[in-house]
Amino acid sequence: MAPVDPHSFTDSNHPFATHISLSLYLDFPSSTIHGSALLSFPNPHSGPLSLDARSLAIHSVIDPESSASLPFSLSPPDPIRGCHLTVSLANHSSVLIVFSTSPSSSALQWLSPPQTFNKTYPLVYTQCQAIHARSVFPCQDTPAARVRYSARLNVPRQLSAVMAARHVDKRAPVAGEGSLLACGDQLWCAEGRAVEEFVMEQPVPPYLFAFAVGEIGFREVGPRTRVYAEAAPAVLDSAAREFAGTEDMIKQGEWLFGPYDWERFDLLVLPPSFPYGGMENPRMVFLTPTVIKGDASGAQVVAHELAHSWTGNLITNKTNDHFWLNEGFTTYAERRIVEAVQGEEKAVLNIGIGWRGLNEEMERFKDNMEFTKLKTNQEGVDPDDVYSQVPYEKGFQFLWRIERQVGRPAFDEFVKKYIATFKFKSIDTDTFLDFLKANIPGIEKEVDLVLWTEGTGIPPDAYEPVSSLYTQIVSLANEFKLGRMPREDEVADWQGQEWELYLENLPKSVEASQILALDERYRLSESKDYEVKVAFLQLAISAKCRDYYGEVEKTLKEVGRMKYLRPLYTALVQGNGKEEEKILAKRVFAEARDSYHPIAQSVVESILSKHL
């Protein structure tokens, strides 16, 4: 076997599917999908074909030409990669696999009506990054294998389906479409069902496969942007206000990086259990509702996901070992868009918060510095367990270092050429470095490319940002150590990002009395901005300020975004003399677990198992 990816059973000696045609029957009462996947290959293939599957029941494998059964085997599950599905082909250029998902599918979260905003209908959504597409359908689940697809989703008629693909039609089911599936034609064509059809005509890595089904409405916010969310006016209107400036950002992205190649840039605001800030699914970005802050600062998350339309979705890291190619580039691009649309001061705050985060990750990985490299070795490692700010912030710092060396105009030309050269390809770090050296001759003499990509820690020529506001906030944070709290006139203009930067720069060892005094004056524990609230609650936990443990519990129960779960659970269980906090963490997780997405569940479980 010649694996292409440490996280996949995909074999480089086998052909990659160029198209997948999916039929999916969503069965809400059992939290399962009954489906079929027709994989098409560029040329006929004889011999074994390796595919990834996780928590899937494989019912049959069929030759679509003759309808004959084909031999297959499914290995016992590997804890990280799932099951190795091997299909035997004999001069076949396509294969049909009939399967069902399990309620424990790691990509899918099924929400019961009480877990939704209107509490009337259920809702389901996917999160396939990093390696979870294989728990929805069998595939070559590596970003090295880009694929086009079409999908038929059979759903209850009163619900709506959205997908990271072009919507073609909503129609009645047709007899015969469900005959091969485990649900059978009787259920496929049952009263009250509808089929929603979608097509993705550009080749995408499997982790960008995404859909959601529920009571979903939308608002128009621009010529190529709708905001979708649960069909409640309060949710839709606040989302439409927050993201009203999206078209300006798209135009800025095009000016910087070249044409926007995905036609639509729609946004889907999901329920609070969504595990990430945003997910850059093409044509339909998925977002947490915690980015709706009422001050348009949530637009920075949208800027990040928009930037992925070029770096990540057009050019993709070949494997997760090179994740910085997706995230470092996108963080750089996001800050360029923010600078152009919201001003340099906002971009510098964004960089400053990232700089703090990068320094904190060095502390987190001090016993395993491999994951402070840009080019990592993730053999035998679950990418969700080592997900961090390093590929984002160290990757950003690397590109910013090159920009400072060659000047912005030259670097802008380089980035445009890079995107035009590699679009719709999946590449690795060496490919990028070769292209860099060919297009900026002598750069390796000015910037230590090996140290930056293969070295651990933060290189000496990384750069803390400079601006008058940034410097003022950091010096106010330093004065807090001497017992001085900021005056009201000093913080009168502060919004969430300023407070977040201030709190991130406070010493971790502050007295409970100081925490109480700060909150009494500025009510940070009640902030509607979760970045501020969670940064404050981390300080409260480290000061053992028990007055706030009720607020910690409430926060852990109302959101499932891992950016908040990870630091709060870690603060509760890490370190000595935390018996009361550990009991709290265990109880809260036991009570909140079912409201978290499966990815978040396993991340919290690994934090607790490490410290309990």
Image (cartoon, grey):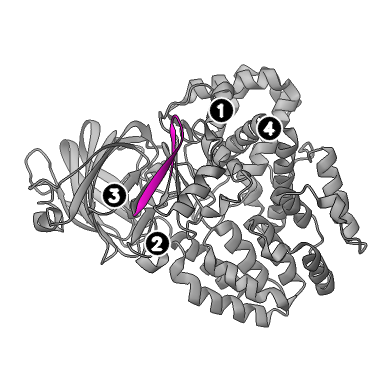
Q: Secondary structure at mark 2?
A: loop
Dot 4 or dot 2, earlier in sequence: 2
Is mark 1 in CB contact (under 8 Å) with mark 3? no
Q: What is the distance, in whole Å, between disc 4 and disc 2 at their CAs?
A: 38 Å
**Which amino acid type is shown beneath numbered disc 4?**
Glu
Q: Nearer the viewer, mark 1 or mark 3?
A: 1
For residue 118, the mark is 2
User: For this rendering, which residue is in front, 55 or 511?
Assistant: 511
Dot 1 or dot 2, earlier in sequence: 2
Q: Residue at x 37, y 44 (%)?
A: 209
Q: Nearer the viewer, mark 4 or mark 2?
A: 2
Left or right of 200 on screen, residue 526 = right
Q: Main SS of the magenta segment?
A: strand
Can residue 55 be found in the magenta stretch? no
User: For this rendering, which residue is in front, 51 or 251?
Assistant: 251
Question: Which residue is labeled 4 in the image?
Answer: 339
Quarter holding the C terminus?
A: bottom right
Dot 2 or dot 3, earlier in sequence: 2
Q: Residue at x 90, y 57 (%)?
A: 479
Question: Which residue is labeled 3 in the image?
Answer: 138
Quadrant in the rendering for residue 458: top right
Q: What is the distance, in whole Å, between disc 3 and disc 4 at their CAs?
A: 42 Å
Q: What is the distance, in whole Å, between disc 2 and disc 3 at their CAs?
A: 34 Å
Q: Nearer the viewer, mark 3 or mark 4?
A: 4
Q: Nearer the viewer, mark 2 or mark 3?
A: 2
